[in-house]
């Protein structure tokens, strides 16, 4: 079917969807960015919606309009369409092969007037192209279903075992490579493509970290998904140095330095989301190990209602964070969600009437309306020096990323006692231990009891995938002591499906150990009572331990006993 040579801009103006002025502006933008289509420019300017754009083309060109909702973007399963049109081409041009009849290939496009794309597909497939029109978002979802997630990454990994000749250093040892050698290898197309696909696949699988580790004769690549590391198929060992060099270039590191640890960062827009990457390298015995921390703002909820608080816990927490002064401690190991809880608290209580300042290491997410400061020990900006400066800035609320030493703890306590609300974190296994830790640091017990409002210990547990979780009746003899079995005697366990990448879990939620300061706890703290006695008093006052809080979520069908035990056994609760 021949595609009419009709200008898209004229069609939209004649349909009354854009004005001539908007078209003129879009054409000016397109002249400055020749690689962009007029349709994408108009969408970027907000002049027209995607549905209006494709519907207009469909009506004016008499080309069928298809959507996933109508079931018209389901490629035929028995025609080998994924072999007819390679995945890389489909994703590059946002084109979906729908069906094939003899030498005619029906494909879904967003802009059938893009003759260059249509001609390229014709040459690649060797077929006459029969276009239909569909929204870009629908096409990309259907592409993922047809080719399978990670298909391009698997191809790139497989290709790496055939590319040792194209990415080589003529027998040179790593320590003898010049800067030009390293840069040249990092910029070769197979390396660029592999790096890009490793990162993109990590984003698709909701990974929080990417670990690239050197082994004596291989590479290990693992994604941390919902707190657990999962290994993916690694590329050939010869790709390690080029891959590391590529990541160093992106992170603005010294690619010639392989003997010392380095830190860097970069930012990328992936699937219309702005994502920050913090990169760390260390020199291991078999080469450099690289870890990329993925900070995806769109994946983080700063709403207290979505973090995992039960109703009573949320009421207790909200009562504390709306107090005018005092100190709130959040405790737990690295990666337990403390920062997210603190950010959500600040996000709820911020207002134009309050001056809120934070000092963090690092500042993970920027929150409008809050003054956030990054510590820089190399120039003398530590938690303590930053806090001293804050107190001269007329603050209402202060957040300290971590209380690590006596000086920082003293300033936090002093601020809480002089009319400021202070949030900070400690690395302790449970809530009662936080009081003992503050006293051990060197804070006098009566200052701790006078300033402290609430201690919250937390962990993150993986949530069961609601699409595939399966009910079962557990053996009562194998259940933990005092487990709150639901009335129907049924629990849920992980199974695995496409939605959760066959793990059985999808996402994480926090479990909390909430310990408000009571008169009894204040009295025990003032007498330097041991942690065990503080814990007994807190539990007698109604505090649920982390494990007990986790078991509540098991009984509600949100997670499993094994998952709760995995994250709480170390806490001794």
Image: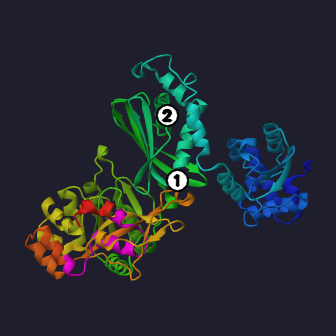
Label 2 – label 1 distance at C-alpha: 21 Å
Quadrant (top left, top right, bottom left, bottom right) of the C terminus: bottom left
**Is residue 558 part of the magenta span, yes or no?**
yes
Classify residue 354 as left or right of residue 403.
Answer: right
Select label 2 or label 1 by which is in front: 1
Q: Does residue 256 lie above or below 196 as drawn?
A: above
Q: Residues within 10 Å of mark 1 (few under 14, many from 20)?
A: some
> Looking at the image, which residue is at 30% across and 56% down?
386
Q: Position of residue 297 (x, y in %)?
A: 50, 58
Q: Does residue 407 lie above or below 2 as drawn?
A: below
The part of the chain drawn in magenta is 538-564
Q: Position of residue 59 (x, y in %)?
A: 88, 62
The chosen color scheme is: rainbow
Classify residue 153 as left or right of residue 30.
Answer: left
- The prevailing secondary structure element of the residues shown in magenta is helix
**Is residue 528 part of the magenta span, yes or no?**
no
Q: Does residue 463 lie above or below 235 as drawn?
A: below
For label 2, the residue is 243
Q: Does residue 28 lie above or below 330 as drawn?
A: above
- The quarter of the picture where residue 17 lies is bottom right
Give the secondary structure at mark 1: loop
Classify residue 493 as left or right of residue 498.
Answer: left
- The quarter of the picture where residue 441 lies is bottom left
Q: Residues within 10 Å of mark 2 (few under 14, many from 20)?
A: many
Label at residue 205: 1
């Amino acid at each position: 079917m021949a595609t009419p040579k009709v200008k898209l801009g004229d069609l939209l103006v004649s349909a009354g969807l854009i004005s001539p002025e908007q078209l003129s502006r879009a054409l000016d933008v397109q002249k400055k960015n020749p690689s962009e289509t007029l349709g994408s420019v108009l969408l970027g300017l907000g002049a027209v919606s995607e549905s209006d754009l494709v519907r207009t083309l469909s009506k004016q060109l008499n080309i069928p309009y298809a959507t996933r909702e109508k079931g018209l973007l389901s490629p035929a399963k028995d025609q080998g369409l994924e072999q007819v049109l390679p995945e890389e081409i489909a994703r590059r041009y946002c084109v979906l092969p729908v069906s094939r009849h003899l030498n005619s290939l029906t494909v879904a496009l967003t802009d059938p007037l893009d003759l260059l794309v249509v001609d390229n597909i014709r040459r690649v497939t060797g077929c006459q192209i029969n276009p239909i029109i569909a929204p870009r978002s629908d096409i990309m979802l259907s592409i993922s279903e047809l080719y399978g997630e990670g298909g391009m990454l698997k191809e790139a990994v497989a290709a790496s075992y055939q590319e040792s000749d194209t990415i080589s250093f003529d027998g040179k040892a790593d320590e003898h490579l010049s800067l030009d050698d390293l840069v040249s290898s990092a910029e070769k197309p197979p390396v660029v493509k592999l790096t890009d696909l490793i990162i993109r696949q990590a984003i698709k699988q909701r990974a929080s970290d990417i670990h690239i580790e050197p082994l004596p004769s291989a590479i290990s690549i693992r994604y941390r998904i919902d707190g657990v590391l999962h290994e993916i198929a690694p590329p050939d060992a010869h790709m390690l140095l080029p891959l590391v060099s590529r990541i160093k270039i992106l992170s603005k590191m010294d690619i010639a330095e392989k003997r010392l640890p380095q830190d860097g960062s970069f930012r990328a827009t992936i699937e219309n989301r702005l994502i920050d990457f913090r990169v760390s390298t260390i020199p291991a015995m078999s080469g450099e190990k690289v870890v990329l921390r993925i900070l995806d703002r769109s994946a983080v909820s700063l709403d207290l209602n979505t973090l995992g608080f039960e109703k009573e816990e949320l009421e207790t927490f909200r009562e504390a964070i709306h107090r005018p002064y005092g100190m709130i401690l959040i405790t737990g190991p690295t990666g337990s969600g403390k920062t997210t809880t603190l950010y959500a608290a600040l996000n709820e209580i911020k207002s134009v009437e309050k001056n809120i300042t934070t000092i963090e290491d690092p500042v993970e997410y920027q929150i409008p309306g809050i003054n956030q400061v990054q510590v820089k020990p190399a120039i003398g900006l530590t938690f303590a020096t930053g806090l001293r400066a804050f107190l001269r800035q007329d603050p209402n609320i202060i957040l300290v990323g971590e209380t690590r030493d006596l000086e920082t703890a003293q300033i936090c306590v002093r601020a809480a006692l002089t009319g400021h609300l202070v949030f900070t974190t400690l690395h302790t296994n449970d809530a009662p231990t936080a009081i003992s830790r503050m006293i051990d640091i060197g804070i006098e017990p009566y200052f701790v009891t006078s300033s402290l409002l609430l201690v919250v210990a937390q962990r993150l547990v993986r949530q069961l995938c609601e699409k595939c979780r399966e009910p079962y009746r557990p053996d009562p003899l194998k259940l933990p002591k005092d487990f709150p079995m639901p009335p129907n005697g049924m629990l849920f366990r992980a199974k695995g499906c496409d939605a959760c990448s066959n793990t059985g879990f999808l996402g994480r939620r926090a479990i909390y150990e909430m310990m408000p300061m009571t008169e009894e706890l204040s009295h025990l703290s003032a007498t330097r009572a041991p942690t065990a006695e503080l814990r007994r008093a807190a539990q007698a006052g109604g505090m649920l331990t982390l494990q007990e809080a986790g078991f509540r979520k098991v009984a509600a069908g949100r997670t499993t006993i094994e998952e709760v035990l995995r994250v709480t056994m170390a806490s001794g609760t």
